């Protein structure tokens, strides 16, 4: 873990503890990196509840309740699927916040409409989506995955510290 990531995790921890809330993650393209980053901080069991790695479409449906029709219509890498992943995690776990990510880390798997580096992220809080967005990251597989971790954690930290969510 590098300094910027550690600082984000610390800020998220402080905000969640202050709010007496817990979070979880639903990860596809990052394969558990966000959960690993969160749990690298000692005492994370106070605010981090769980992480689900749902790499396949079937796991997104079985574990998170993403309708197969949504995946079929929009593709695994879409704002719609990321949103369903986040809301599904909230529905299946005792959480206040859920961060979900799905993307194409590469080096293959991209298309003209969704090139390698396309990532969709979603954050849900108290049963509702509070942010869903798409990013386009450059670099190799590792760079895309690290950028996804930082984008997701950064957005979550911003929402937690804003206090309006």
Image (spheres, rainbow, N blue to C red):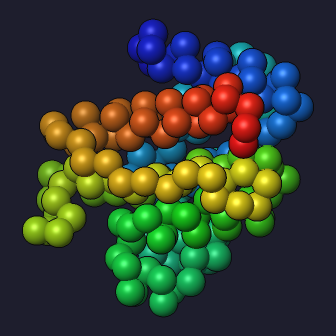
Q: Nearer the viewer, residue 33 or 66?
A: 66
Q: Residue placed at 39% from the left, 86% from the top? A: 72
User: On the rendered structure, is 120 left or right of 97?
Assistant: left
Outermost right residue: 20
Q: Residue placed at 25% from the left, 48% from the top? A: 136
Which image quarter is the N terminus in?
top left
Residue 1 sits above or below residue 163 on the image = above
Outermost top residue: 3
Q: Position of residue 80 (x, y in %)?
A: 47, 71
Which image quarter is the C terminus in?
top right
Residue 145 shows in the view: yes
Q: Position of residue 68 (x, y in %)?
A: 50, 86
Q: Position of residue 63 (x, y in %)?
A: 64, 70
User: On the rendered structure, is 71 left or right of 37?
Assistant: left
Quadrant in the picture for residue 3? top left
Q: Residue placed at 84% from the left, 22% from the top? A: 18
Residue 105 shows in the view: no
Outermost bottom residue: 69
User: On the rendered structure, is 144 left or right of 1?
Assistant: left
Q: Nearer the viewer, residue 147 or 39?
A: 147
Q: How many marks?
A: 0
Q: Position of residue 73 (x, y in %)?
A: 38, 86
Q: Residue placed at 51% from the left, 44% from the top? A: 32
Residue 102 sits above or below residue 149 on the image = below
């Amino acid at each position: 873990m590098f300094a910027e990531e550690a600082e984000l995790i610390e800020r998220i921890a402080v905000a969640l503890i202050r709010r007496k809330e817990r979070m979880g993650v639903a990860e596809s393209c990052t394969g558990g990196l966000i959960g690993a980053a969160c749990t690298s901080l000692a005492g994370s069991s106070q605010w981090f509840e769980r992480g689900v790695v749902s790499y396949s479409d079937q796991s997104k449906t079985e574990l998170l309740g993403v309708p197969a029709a949504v995946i079929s219509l929009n593709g695994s890498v879409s704002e719609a699927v990321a949103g369903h992943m986040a809301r599904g995690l909230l529905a299946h776990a005792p959480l206040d916040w859920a961060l979900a990510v799905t993307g194409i880390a590469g080096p293959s798997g991209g298309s003209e409409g969704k090139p390698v580096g396309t990532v969709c992220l979603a954050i849900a809080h108290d049963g509702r989506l509070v942010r869903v967005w798409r990013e386009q990251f450059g670099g190799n597989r590792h760079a895309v995955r690290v950028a996804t971790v930082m984008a997701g954690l950064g957005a979550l930290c911003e929402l937690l510290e804003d206090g309006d969510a």
